[in-house]
Image (cartoon, rainbow, N blue to C red):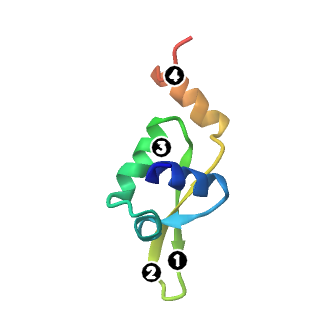
């Protein structure tokens, strides 16, 4: 199983992961590229800003279901062909 497939499995299992967690857990040097590749493959990966107890903002990635507006925008942009 590839590192990206392991990342996808973790996201499908409901994990919310920061870039640092992705790097350490899956040994992915460029987590942003891995997330972009998943998005380009059609997965709705969301980036949510969170604040930890020290007041530091972090971005956590999660897998979600695209809203109707997102799907409509993708069709309008020509991302899908009939």
Alpha-carbon neighbours of circle 3 within 10 Å: few (<14), some, or many (≥20)?
A: some
Mark 3 or 1: the one toward you: 3
Q: Are marks 1 and 2 in contact (CB under 8 Å)?
A: yes
Residue 38 at x, y = what percent? 47, 43
Taking the spot 52% from the left edge, 28% from the top edge, the residue there is 74
The label shown at residue 66 is none
Query: How far separated are the C-alphas under marks 2 and 3?
Result: 27 Å
Disc 1 secondary structure class: strand
Mark 4 highlights which residue?
Answer: 76
Mark 1 highlights which residue?
Answer: 51
- Looking at the figure, which quarter contains the C terminus? top right
Residue 33 at x, y = what percent? 35, 50
Query: Which of pointers 3 and 1 lies earlier in the amino acid sequence?
Result: 3
Furthest residue toward front: 1
> Quarter-wise, where is residue 50 in the image?
bottom right
The label shown at residue 38 is 3
Disc 4 secondary structure class: helix
Q: Are marks 4 and 2 in contact (CB under 8 Å)?
A: no
Q: Are marks 1 and 4 in contact (CB under 8 Å)?
A: no
Query: Which of pointers 2 and 3 lies earlier in the amino acid sequence?
Result: 3
The label shown at residue 56 is 2
Mark 3 or 4: the one toward you: 3
Alpha-carbon neighbours of circle 2 within 10 Å: few (<14), some, or many (≥20)?
A: few
Q: Are marks 2 and 3 in contact (CB under 8 Å)?
A: no
Q: Is residue 72 above or below residue 18?
A: above
Query: Which of pointers 1 and 4 lies earlier in the amino acid sequence?
Result: 1
């Amino acid at each position: 199983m590839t590192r990206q497939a392991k990342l996808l499995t973790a996201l499908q299992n409901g994990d919310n992961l920061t870039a640092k967690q992705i790097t350490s857990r899956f040994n992915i040097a460029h987590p942003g590229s891995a997330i972009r590749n998943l998005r380009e493959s059609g997965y709705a990966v969301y980036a949510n800003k969170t604040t930890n107890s020290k007041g530091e903002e972090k971005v956590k990635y999660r897998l979600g279901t695209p809203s109707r507006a997102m799907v409509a925008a993708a069709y309008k942009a020509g991302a899908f062909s009939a």
